[in-house]
Image (cartoon, grey):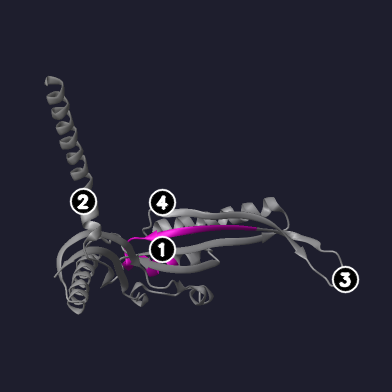
Amino acid sequence: MKTILRAFALSLVMATAGGAVALAQAAPSAGDTMFRSTTLSLAAHGESKIKPDMATISLGVMIRADTAAAAMRANAARMDQVMAALAKAGVAAKDIQTSNLSLTPQYLYVQNQAPRPNGYQASNQVTVTVHDLARLGAAVDATVTAGANEVNSISFGLNDATAAENVAREKAVQALQARADLYARATGYRVQRLVSLSEGGGYAVSPPMPMASFARSALAVSASQVSPEELNVRIDVSGLYELTR
């Protein structure tokens, strides 16, 4: 009799345990619950306009001579003059970075003849950052006067884009929320909560200003004649919303 009772008790415990396991498997996980909910994934952007307060100039010196040594010496001497002119115009040494230094042989090409050596060309290109736009005209003028014969381009930017980016962020989030509300209403739902939010993007400067015309005219430019366009600061955001009836 005791053996029969023990067997019955054991079978009851196993049945209870089995039921608990089955119950645990049937209960949906938190991730499964969120997956089953109605969600809306959207993207939007915000923009702000701001005047630039700094500029980057690409310029350099190109010299041709009969020998490689002569070309390098002449280029270095001319570049020293350009550097001195930039310093006099108020540009700090840390804001002048060499972007390219090259020495290439030159050849004379005549039809039906083998190319003949025709000296060497030395080129030294630098990128100059001007943090005060009031000094921009004088800085570029000084470089050309000092011997810079390659003034390629000038682009404008911001010393600190944080404030402009924050304005764009607020506009981006507002646009995202408005879009979510619109889609929810259109589909018979309402927004219950924002599940996730991510950001991308940054500010895009205005197109670089060609400097060839300045170089040809010896750059008799005053700072008041430099009138850069406003910068368009853009921030992109994307969000996942949970909807409810």
The kind of residue tagged 1 is Thr
Residue furthest toward the bottom? 186
Left or right placement of residue 22 versus residue 227 in this view: left
- Distance from the alpha carbon under mark 3 to that under mark 2: 84 Å
* Disc nearest the viewer among 1 and 4: 1
Q: Secondary structure at mark 4?
A: helix
Query: Is residue 2 among the parts visible in the rendering?
Result: yes
Where does the N terminus fall, quadrant-wise? top left
Percent position of residue 48, x then y: 25, 72
Of labels 4 and 2, earlier in sequence is: 2
Q: Secondary structure at mark 2?
A: loop
Q: Is residue 156 magenta?
A: no
Residue 190, by quadrant, is bottom left
Compared to residue 107, the image places residue 11 above or below, namely: above
Residue topped by disc 2: 28
Residue 229, by quadrant, is bottom left
The kind of residue tagged 3 is Asn
> Which residues fall within the magenta stretch?
122-140
Residue topped by disc 4: 93
The kind of residue tagged 4 is Ala
Asked if the residue under mark 3 is in contact with the one under mark 1, i.e. CB atoms within 8 Å, the reply is no
* Disc nearest the viewer among 3 and 4: 3
Residue topped by disc 1: 56
- Distance from the alpha carbon under mark 1 to that under mark 3: 45 Å
Residue topped by disc 3: 112
